[in-house]
Amino acid sequence: MFGWTTILCAAALALSGVGAGQAPVLVKVTGTYPAGDVVTLGRDQNFYLHLDYSSDRPVKIWARPYFEGKPAHAGSNPSRSYPAGSGEALGWFFLSSPGVRVDEVRISAGDGSFGGTHVVAVYPVSVTCSTEVAGKAPAPAWIGTLEAADDAAQRADREKHLNTVPSAGDVALFSGFMLAMCVLGVLGFAAPLWGLWRWRRHWRWAAAVPLLGMVFVVLRLFVDVVRDPTSHNLWPFEIVLWGACSVGWMLVLALARRLTGAGRI
């Protein structure tokens, strides 16, 4: 069952390094938890892979489950940047619902971009998700050690970003985005209000549509943030999106009025 897929992925790995000017990243699985070639996961249980890697450059590593050549219905680990050289890495995944099956894990490594990330190893294993609660058997020490290392690296990255002085380009980009948010937010309300004031009959009702949408969005943001301040961390993007939709709707209506001659009545 694993033969042809494994051979094809190995061939892809060999070809990915051709002409790239860099040595391929080497990754091998040295252990799993739960252990075994045939594994049944309990409800909300992760499948962990203990990985050894070797790379001549910083690299990110992902372990993604597949079944019959297609991605399985599962969630898998994000990846921090591992330093150049050799070391250990942690891969894991969980299955989304009972009955989901896995017949291989494809391990990818690279910089995260489409062209810079390749499958570097294939680990054949049969994993199935059950409805039972996972047993209480203690996890091996390497899981806790590698999870602690990942947490420490993530904290260091956050502190580095917090302590990094933004460049002039970053400041300009942020300022431009905030200006666009303010402009689109105001126009998102002003354009429909202008249509309600100037237009008549069904055109007025059409202009009310984006206005109602903007009112709903702003009220929803306000209510949700009062209940949970973390519920809309990307609220400026919501304002930009809905403001642009409102302005776009009004431009389409204005063009339709011109083409139909309604604007001259």
Image (tube, helix red, strand yellow):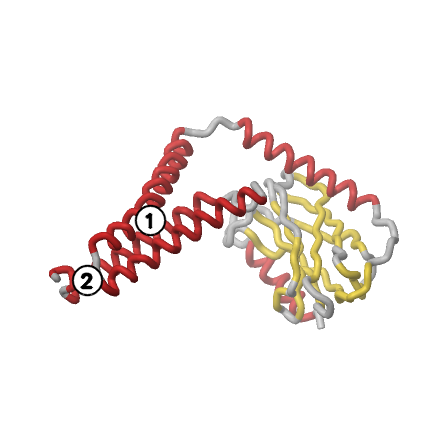
Q: Position of residue 72 (x, y in %)?
A: 65, 65
Q: Position of residue 196 (x, y in %)?
A: 26, 54
Judged left or right of residue 144, residue 159 is: left
Q: Position of residue 113 (x, y in %)?
A: 51, 50
Residue that lies at the very extreme toward the left in this rendered image: 264
| Residue 187 drawn above or below residue 64 | above
Q: Which label is found at residue 188? A: 1
Q: Earlier in the sequence, mark 2 or mark 1?
A: 1
Is residue 202 something that shows in the picture? Answer: yes
Asked whether 203 or 96 is in front, the reply is: 203
Q: Position of residue 123 (x, y in %)?
A: 72, 60
Q: Residues within 10 Å of mark 1 (few under 14, many from 20)?
A: many
Q: Which label is found at residue 197? A: none
Mark count? 2
| Residue 168 drawn above or below residue 46 | above
Asked whether 211 or 165 is in front, the reply is: 211
Residue under label 2, please give it: 257
Q: Determine the image quadrant of residue 1.
A: bottom right
Q: Residue at x 83, y 49 (%)?
A: 139
Q: Determine the image quadrant of residue 68.
A: bottom right
Q: Residue at x 65, y 68 (%)?
A: 5
What secondary structure is marked by label 2?
helix
Asked whether 176 or 185 is in front, the reply is: 185
In what quadrant of the picture does the C terminus appear? bottom left
Residue that lies at the very extreme toward the bottom in this rendered image: 1
CA–CA distance in space, label 2 to label 1: 19 Å
What secondary structure is marked by label 1?
helix
Judged left or right of residue 222, residue 185 is: left
Q: Residue at x 39, y 38 (%)?
A: 178
Which amino acid type is shown beneath numbered disc 2? Arg
Q: Residues within 10 Å of mark 2 (few under 14, many from 20)?
A: some
Which amino acid type is shown beneath numbered disc 1? Gly
